[in-house]
Image: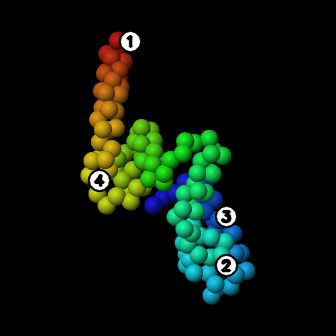
Amino acid sequence: MLLTSETLRVLKVHRDRQRIERQSLGEDAWSAGDAIVTTTAGTIPNPTTVKTRLRQLLAVAAVPDVTTYELRHMAATRMLRAGVSPALVAQKLGHRDISTTTGTYGHLIAEDQGAANLAIEQAIQRARGVS
């Protein structure tokens, strides 16, 4: 999966921070393996801790209190609304089949049909010289 350059930059900084924590603890004490989300003690965090931290970050960012599932749904919706193809959105979400994406978000795609039709009509009118 392709990630944005900013996402890659943030993940690299995070990985470097984890390396330092891992070295200070010692390899034997670090039980989280290569997990991205870990505690400073090198373990996988409790889901409640993750939810609490997510709420704190959302508050700082002035984003409504949502779950990780809702964040995923918001991302998919924004991608589709921005004109990203359902096939690419499916890939980003890790759906094995595009039908999962179109089945879940098909209503958005159908709503966008009106905008697509309007764009086609406007293009035809411009080609005919009609304003």
The residue tagged with tag 2: helix, strand or loop?
Answer: helix
* Mark 3 vs mark 2: in front: 2
Q: Amino acid at mark 1?
A: Ser
Q: Give whichever of discs 3 and 1 has the lower sequence position.
A: 3
Q: Tag 4: residue type?
A: Thr
Can you tell which quarter of the image residue 118 is in? top left
Q: Which residue is mark 1?
A: 131
Q: Give the residue at mark 2.
A: 22
Point 71% across, 75% down: residue: 20
Place residue 110 in its image quadrant: top left
The answer to which of 30 and 52 lies nearer the viewer is 52
Residue at the farthest front position: 48
Residue at x 70% of width, y 81% of height: 25
What's the distance in space between the residues labelled 3 and 1, CA to CA? 52 Å
Q: Earlier in the sequence, mark 1 or mark 2?
A: 2
- Structural crowding at the residue carrying mark 4, measured as other residues with C-alpha within 10 Å and reported as few (<14), some (14–19) or many (≥20): few
- The structure residue drawn at horizontal position 70% and vertical position 75%, both measured from the top left corner, is 21
- Of mark 4 and mark 3, the one earlier in the sequence is 3
Q: Determine which residue is flagged by label 3.
A: 13
Assess disc 2: are there few (<14), some (14-19) or many (≥20) residues with their C-alpha within 10 Å of its C-alpha: many
Image depth: mark 3 or mark 1 in front: 3
Which circle, 4 or 3, is nearer the viewer? 4
- Describe the element under mark 3 as helix, strand or loop: helix
Q: Nearer the viewer, mark 4 or mark 1?
A: 4
User: Disc 4 versus disc 3: distance between alpha carbons?
Assistant: 34 Å
Labels 3 and 2: the sequence-earlier one = 3
Question: Mark 4 sits on what residue?
Answer: 100
Q: Amino acid at mark 3?
A: Val
Disc 2 marks which amino acid?
Arg
Task: Name the N-terminal-most of marks 4 and 1.
Answer: 4
